[in-house]
Image: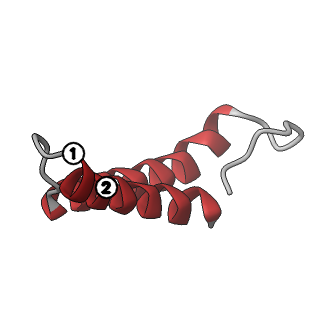
Amino acid sequence: MWAVVLPILYGGLIEVLQDNFFPPRSGDWYDWLADSLGVIVSFLLCRIFVPKFFKQESSFRCN
């Protein structure tokens, strides 16, 4: 779960910081939405494809 929540929060924080502290840059909520969708899609793809390529006895897993 933290593999999804933390990157989404981090993306939102970066957008807020860009808007408030870096004058030539602007925070864009659509950019944050794209970041969030990328995190969610990556997580879902990991859940689908990792079990197909790695056997159960492997220590690698998607949380």
Residue at 77 percent of width and 39 percent of height: 60
Q: Amino acid at mark 1?
A: Phe
**Whether residue 23 is situated above or below residue 34 in the rendered picture:** above
> What is the crowding at mark 2: few (fewer than 14 residues within 10 Å), some, or many (at least 20)?
some
The front one of 20 and 56 is 20
Question: Measured from the top left, where is residue 10 in percent x and y?
Answer: 45, 56
* Amino acid at circle 2: Leu
- Is the Cβ of the residue at disc 1 closer than 8 Å to that at disc 2? yes
Q: Secondary structure at mark 2?
A: helix
Q: Quadrant of residue 20?
A: bottom left
User: Which mark sits nearer the N-terminus, 1 or 2?
Assistant: 2
Along the line of sight, the residue nearer the viewer: 47 or 6: 6
19 displayed left or right of 35: left
Please give the residue where the numbered disc 2 appears in the rendered image. 17
Which quarter of the image is occupied by the N terminus? bottom right
Check the image and report above or below for 9 versus 35. Answer: below
Residue 36, picture quadrant: bottom left
2 left or right, relative to 23: right
The residue indicated by pointer 1 is 22
Q: Residues within 10 Å of mark 1 (few under 14, many from 20)?
A: few
Kindly state the secondary structure of the residue where label 1 is placed.
Answer: loop
* x then y, percent, for residue 48: 53, 50
Which picture quadrant has residue 63? bottom right
